[in-house]
Image (cartoon, rainbow, N blue to C red):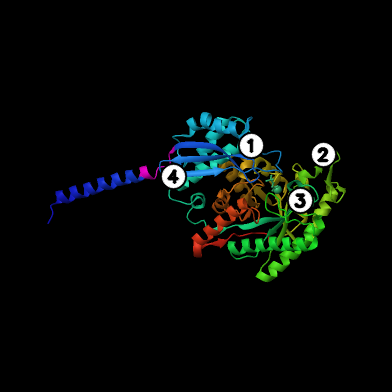
Amino acid sequence: MKSYDSTKRLRNEKRQEASIDRNEKMKIMSTVIEDIIARKVFNSRGEETVEVDIITSSGFGRVSAPAGKSRGKAEVTYYPQGGVEQAVKRVEELVAPEIVGLNADSQEEIDKTLREIDGSKDFRTIGGNTAFAISLANAEAAANSSGLLLFQYLGGQIANELPYPLGNTISGGKHAEGKSPDIQEFLVLSHGAETFLEASTANIQVHRKIGETLTKKDKLFGEGRSDEGAWVANIGNEEAFNVLTMACEEVGNELGFDCGLGIDVASSSLWNAKTKTYNYQRENKKRNSGEQLDFILELIKNYHLAYVEDPFHEEDFRGFAELTKKTKNCLITGDDLFTTNNERLSRGIKLHAGNAIIIKVNQVGTLSNALETIEMAKRNGYTPVVSHRSGDTCDWHIAHLAIGFKCPIIKTGVVEGSRIAKINELIRIEEFLGDRARMADLKML
Ligand code: PGA
Ligand code: ZN
């Protein structure tokens, strides 16, 4: 039998070993930032964009920034003068000395530091897209260093809700130009699906059916697609609605669940501030604010729209409020209106303008800012919709944001590489979650 002393000694030795082990593990699991590297890459439009790597002693995050074409006026500035090259330089000269040595686990501190380094309200010194890539790469590095997937790191171990995919099927407006509909996007939202895989399959079938219909209708239809992979066709708004309605009905009947319709009017692109009218070029029609309201109300009624984005220009909070009051069971979503900015959202909340908000992190620059806006939206009954940009990369991180931040819809095109990158990541996560996977609770539908 061992003496009391020797037992105690043994226990102490074990404790010491355990503590060395723990220290070793802590060292291995360190989230302290060791390096940050920025480089110039390209987006799906072939435009230059910025990509950032954040390296800790035990992990790594890499994020590239997207770019919009129909941008809101209140968005941050993407790059400093001198473009991406200047942004890369500023990361080396201004950001790296301040960020290296900080803990990636403190997202708020990192984001605050980025704001301090920049010193401007719209990120014009380092660039809003640079801030976006650093902020998100930092979260990914922290997750990776802790042995977690990004959505688990952001949403905790209980995060298990998949968003419904909302995707563009026919392009118009600024995204297509020429002889296409005046409305920028004709969208499908398969909100009746029971799994993410089912929902994205339905969206793809709707997109395919539309392509087949357009081929039959128009001998000159060349199967052209826009940046977001949606069809570009020589049709007007009404024809686009009819083709989309038919495809949604047919696919819905085949699969046995509802495939809803939506639009992004992107009204700021139609608005003429001088004449105070929305100019529908293809239709050869001008609508004043009252006529625009009637027009949108009619569309919602006639086509049973489940989703309407930017039905009024970006300063018309009252138009949004009027429409929201007059509709039921339809998401009235602000994109250019809110630009993911919590001050603009708070103005909208006071006026009851809209009931949903597009979340594009690069409209505000940092993850912390976007999260503040998401939380404010949820507290006030607004549905947050995490979204891609028309110029994007195969970066899939927004898929994780949708789950981690519990946003019930992800807007990311139906086909095309950059969109499919996000869709496929969600399919992987759904598989990873197995029995625990659930579709999000999508209110109002
Ligand atoms: P974007 O617009 O071209 O600015 O990405 C897409 C949208 O309006 O939703
Ligand atoms: Zn939009």
Which residue occupies the foreground of this view, 171 or 234? 234
Which residue occupies the foreground of this view, 427 or 85? 85
Q: Which mark is residue 172?
A: 3
Mark 2–mark 1 CB contact (< 8 Å): no
Percent across and percent down for residue 53 are 50, 40
Q: Is residue 400 magenta?
A: no
Q: Residues within 10 Å of mark 1 (few under 14, many from 20)?
A: many
Tell me the SS state at disc 2: loop
Q: Amino acid at mark 1?
A: Tyr
Q: Which residue is mark 1?
A: 78
Q: Which residue is mark 2?
A: 273
Tell me the SS state at disc 4: loop
Q: Nearer the viewer, mark 4 or mark 3?
A: 3
Mark 1–mark 4 CB contact (< 8 Å): no
Q: Who comes first in sequence, dot 1 or dot 3?
A: 1
| Marks 4/3: CA–CA distance | 42 Å
Q: Who comes first in sequence, dot 2 or dot 3?
A: 3
| Marks 1/3: CA–CA distance | 24 Å
Tell me the SS state at disc 1: loop
Q: Residues within 10 Å of mark 3 (few under 14, many from 20)?
A: many
Q: Amino acid at mark 4?
A: Gly
Q: Is residue 155 left or right of residue 392?
A: left
Q: Nearer the viewer, mark 2 or mark 4?
A: 4
Q: Who comes first in sequence, dot 2 or dot 4?
A: 4
Q: Nearer the viewer, mark 1 or mark 3?
A: 3
> Which quarter of the image is occupied by the C terminus?
bottom right
Q: Is residue 242 above or below residue 153?
A: below
Q: Which residue is mark 4?
A: 59
Report the span colored magenta: 26-33
